[in-house]
Amino acid sequence: MHHEAVIEHGGAKRLIAEIEASDPSDDYFDSKVHVLSEMIKHHVKEEEKSDGMFAEAKKSKMDLADLGRQLLERKRALDGERQAA
């Protein structure tokens, strides 16, 4: 499962970069956005399964709310660094 997720994330990142580097006048823009949407929907569906990553996280007894706060803080810090550059 982990290996598939790594590959899916990589594919999504590449597609996002292509979308960001183009604009709606690109003949493939709408198709790229559609494919990305379908990829994300599929990925979330896989993670929401009873044996998926979300279920595994719940079983781990981690404080998921605290983890979410930490991730948000880190995201904001990275966004700030990116904007400062």
Image (spheres, helix red, strand yellow):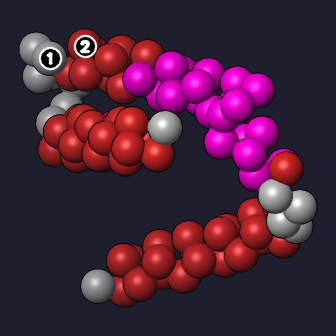
Indicate whether 56 appears above or below 31. Answer: below
Indicate whether 15 appears above or below 28. Answer: below
In the displayed structure image, the side of residue 71 where residue 39 appears, left or right: left
Q: What kind of residue is marked 2?
A: Ser
Q: Say which quarter of the image contains residue 41.
A: top right
Residues marked 2 and 1 touching at CB (< 8 Å): yes
Tell me the residue that label 1 is attached to. Answer: 28
**Residue in view at x 81 percent, y 58 percent:** 60
Q: Say which quarter of the image contains residue 51.
A: top right
Instruction: Give the x, y percent position of residue 55.
Output: 77, 39
Q: What element carries label 2?
A: helix
Q: What stretch is highlighted in magenta?
A: 39-58
Instruction: Give the x, y percent position of residue 4.
Output: 39, 36
| Furthest residue in direction left, as rendered | 27
Q: What kind of residue is marked 1?
A: Tyr
**Residue in view at x 75 percent, y 64 percent:** 68
In the displayed structure image, the side of residue 70 where residue 85 appears, left or right: left
Residue 8: say if magenta.
no
Residue 46: say if magenta.
yes
* Closer to the camera in the image, 23 or 82: 82
* Closer to the camera in the image, 81 or 70: 70
Residue 83 - label: none
* Closer to the camera in the image, 66 or 82: 66
Tell me the residue that label 2 is attached to. Answer: 31
- Is the magenta region chiefly helix, strand or loop? helix
